[in-house]
Amino acid sequence: MSRLIVLSNRIPTEAEPAGGLVVALHECLMRQGGIWIGSSAEPQDVAHEELTEIGSGPYRRLAFDLSHEEHENFYLGYANSVLWPLFHRRSDLIAFDAAYAEAYAAVNARVARLLAQVIRPGDLVWVHDYHFLPVARALRALGVANRIGFFLHTPFPLAADIPALPERDEFPEWLAAFDLVGLQTERDVSALQEHFRADPAAIFDLEGGVHTAHGSFLAAAFPIGIDVESFIAQAEASDGAERLALAPDQRLLIGVDRLDYSKGIVNRFEAFGAYLADRPEDAPRATLIQIAPPSRAELEAYREIRTELETTAGALNGAYAELDWTPIRYIRRNVQRERLAGLYRRANAALVTPLADGMNLVAKEYVAAQDPDDPGVLILSHFAGAAEQMGGALLVNPYDTGEMARAIAAALEMPLADRRARHAGMMEELLARDISWWTESFLSTLARQTHRAAAE
Ligand code: GDG
């Protein structure tokens, strides 16, 4: 069996709670042997040309340095102020700075040199996410002929938006240096094909192969899943709901998101406000619990969205709260995973309403956590990748406050038989394509790629 070399922005440490993706990759590495490579937890004064061993364990974890300047220009700059907004249809938020592109190229070139030192013939290389788009091209230039797969966790950018990228001419070359480009949804595969259609020399085959002047690769959808069984067990064992101290008939809605402008949290609060405004006097009270741990807080766009969110929550609570009822409970602190599972189970509906999202695992976790005899309702944005699979959700346009407010009312009034049928359908899909399916199908597809002579 081939060894696996994983490259991702961060390497999981023992101190952090392990999510489904981390556990799944950990299991692959345990099975196949290999190395997990990512950036050091803290930026350094100088980025040395070496990999540092992290901890000890059944497989190696190696970290590469990022200097303070690279943290600014590569991570916060190019990755999160150019690619992230572009890939989430927010070209208006792109920050243009030549230093960003320079740092992005330099870090990827260094990571490629370091990777080339540890890759052995026959290894499979699995690169994660938009931080490392050019790394395969850099590896090919160093003579690495191994199979290299890439998985994009975000949406694939719309063809019409890609011209906003200063490095638009290099973008197709970056992709073509991989053997396999995995995307979350069929919609993303179509977006990729549309982008390559602009190249008159590009040929597409029926199996998803894209043949370009820069090389051939396979583009396919691998919708990421969750560890369904372990989520069910956590939800059943959790004390999350008791901690809320809610009256038994109190209706609960839940939102859980990294605080990010792509997640549509402000729109969601406004929709909940519209629901509250229209709610009949005698309707049961509903509370929205929103868990939103901050991320990328050094960036202005993230500080702005936080202020906007907190202002909106404050205004709605001011308008609708009563002495014994707070409509929005907003929690910025990270909530333990087990507790979260119990909160999902207690919630009558989840509001998963991103403006753009690669997949959105919260949608899947919410469904998995439900009591099958009395399940809650998933309200899901059309623009989450999960919408392609979760046919039993109430699908909404997150920009349409009125539509979302009506979906909240419909969810809270939905008859049990309807809730059960929707939940059962979604569970079937979740079980069929869980996180093990995801890693296995990606890696077996990568292992089958034969067009580029792999160094055996
Ligand atoms: C990217 C893509 C894609 C959140 N708050 C807490 C907490 N969480 C956990 C959730 C969930 C995860 O974080 C968030 O995952 P998402 O999928 O919703 O979103 P991103 O972080 O943006 O992830 C996304 C994903 O990659 C995987 O490919 O689905 O589209 O953007 O697991 O539960 N967990 C705990 N406490 C919190 O307070 N324990």
Image: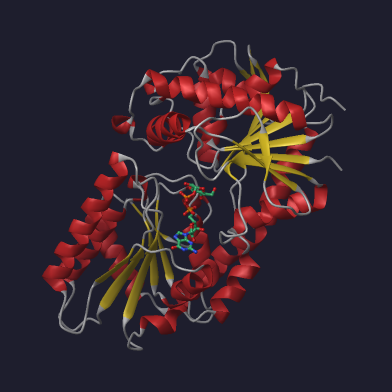
Quadrant position of the C terminus in the picture: top right
Q: Position of residue 222 (x, y in %)?
A: 62, 44
Q: Position of residue 212 (x, y in %)?
A: 63, 15
Quadrant position of the N terminus in the picture: top right
Instruction: Classify residue 205 as left or right of residue 451.
Output: left
Q: Is residue 8 visible?
A: no
Residue at the front extreme of this rendering:
45
* Location of residue 259 with respect to 406 vertically, above or below: above
The residue positioned 40% from the left and 31% from the top of the image is: 77
The residue positioned 51% from the left and 43% from the top of the image is: 42
| Residue 27: quadrant of the picture | bottom right
* Location of residue 149 with respect to 335 vertically, above or below: above
In the rendered picture of this protein, how many numbered marks are placed on residues?
A: 0
* Location of residue 367 with respect to 47 vertically, above or below: below
Q: Is residue 138 visible?
A: yes
The residue positioned 49% from the left and 41% from the top of the image is: 154
Residue at the left extreme of this rendering:
319
Q: Nearer the viewer, residue 244 or 49?
A: 49
The residue positioned 68% from the left and 55% from the top of the image is: 24
Colour pattern of the rendering: secondary structure
Q: Position of residue 136 (x, y in %)?
A: 65, 25
Q: Position of residue 307 (x, y in %)?
A: 22, 52
